[in-house]
Image: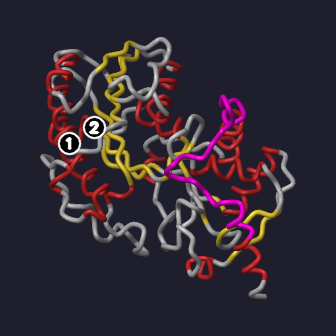
Amino acid sequence: MDVLVLGGTVFLGRAVVAEAQAAGAKVTVFNRGKSGPAPDGTEQLTGDRTAAADLEQLAGRHFDVVVDTSGYVPVDVARSAELLAPSCDYYAFVSTINVYPGWPAMDDYHDGGVHAGNPDATRDDVPNPDEAYGWLKAGCEQAVVGAFGIGRSSLLRAGCIVGPYDSQVGRLSWWIDRVSRGGEVLAPGAPDDPVAVVDSRDLARFALARPTGAFEVTGDPVPRRELLDSCRDVTGSDATFTWVDTDWLTQQDVDEWTEIPLWASEPSTFRHDNTEAKAAGLPVRPVRQTIADMWAWQQGVPGGWQPAGMTPGLDEEKERQLLKAWRATD
């Protein structure tokens, strides 16, 4: 099997390369060569997908599977999909749950369908800046289907992606690191609140299996208690968890999702439906296994693992102050 990965050097792209190689595939990566070296054993094509001349390196080449991990602007995705459609068999596009404008505020965010999008849009065409990410991704989906048809493509509407080598976002990585340091840990919400994450390697394996159609690609929900207990068990820490009410937290000066990763007050944040994806072959590994693999990776990061700029996590002093204020409400 010949596989082309648009991206391929960090996190999800890296996972796609590794899963493809494990299955015996020949892998080519196309990227700008700026995010990191090409994985061992791959053919590196260096170019910018926004430049038609760079994409010409791919013209006429046959790939059984194209996995697009780096498409964010419809006009750019359309350019690559239209160029590859005549010579390639299948195109997997990594999209996002954000294509649903009702997510995460609505109890059933599916009711409103997906963003209208525009397959020819640029970043300048976004009608509502607050919904730019989902609107643009919806347009990217349309561009893929326009070029390959739904019978030769998949739209992988991913939830929160986690796993080893997540050096750019690091939501679960932050929790693993925080719990590993032990002591009293602020745990948001209630112990039974659901949390759903998808391992990058499971998403990669699903893309390479060539399902056709649109899928919500998320992990199975687990109680937040189980996720945090797994962090403690895997790291061997002495952490204790103080559960802090969501309504109270929303009244404090705390940024949801960034200062407290994997936590938000909206009702449907983790209320996904991965039924169709699992029926089509999405593997879902236990969250404890993902955490163990991530902890092993974090321990080996040169210079020590550090939070990403996108997810700084809760400052230690601020956490202490919040816990003190919470105890005073009793």
Q: Nearer the viewer, residue 142 or 39?
A: 39
Q: Could you tell me the amino acid type at mark 2?
A: Ser
Q: Position of residue 255 (x, y in %)?
A: 53, 67
172 up-or-down from 31: above or below: below
Residue 5, position as x, y percentages in the image: 36, 26
Q: First in sequence: mark 2 or mark 1?
A: 1
Question: Is residue 301 in the magenta section?
Answer: yes
Up the image or down, 39 lies above or below 165; here it is above
Which scheme is used to colour this image of the protein?
Answer: secondary structure
Q: Nearer the viewer, residue 58 or 212?
A: 58
Residue furthest left as drawn? 120
Residue drawn at x 60%, y 47% is: 307
> Disc 1 marks which residue?
145
Give the x, y percent position of residue 273.
Answer: 46, 59
- Residue 111 appears in which quarter of the rendering? bottom left
Residue that extends furthest to the bottom in the rendered view of this protein: 330
Q: Is residue 60 left or right of residue 24?
A: left
Q: Regarding mark 2 in the picture, which secondary structure is present there?
A: strand
Task: Based on the picture, tell me whether residue 40 belongs to the magenta stretch.
Answer: no
Determine which of the numbered discs, if any, sits on residue 153 in the image. 2
Residue displayed at 51% across by 24% down: 18
| The residue stretch that appears in magenta | 297-320
Between marks 2 and 1, how big is the CA–CA gap? Answer: 7 Å
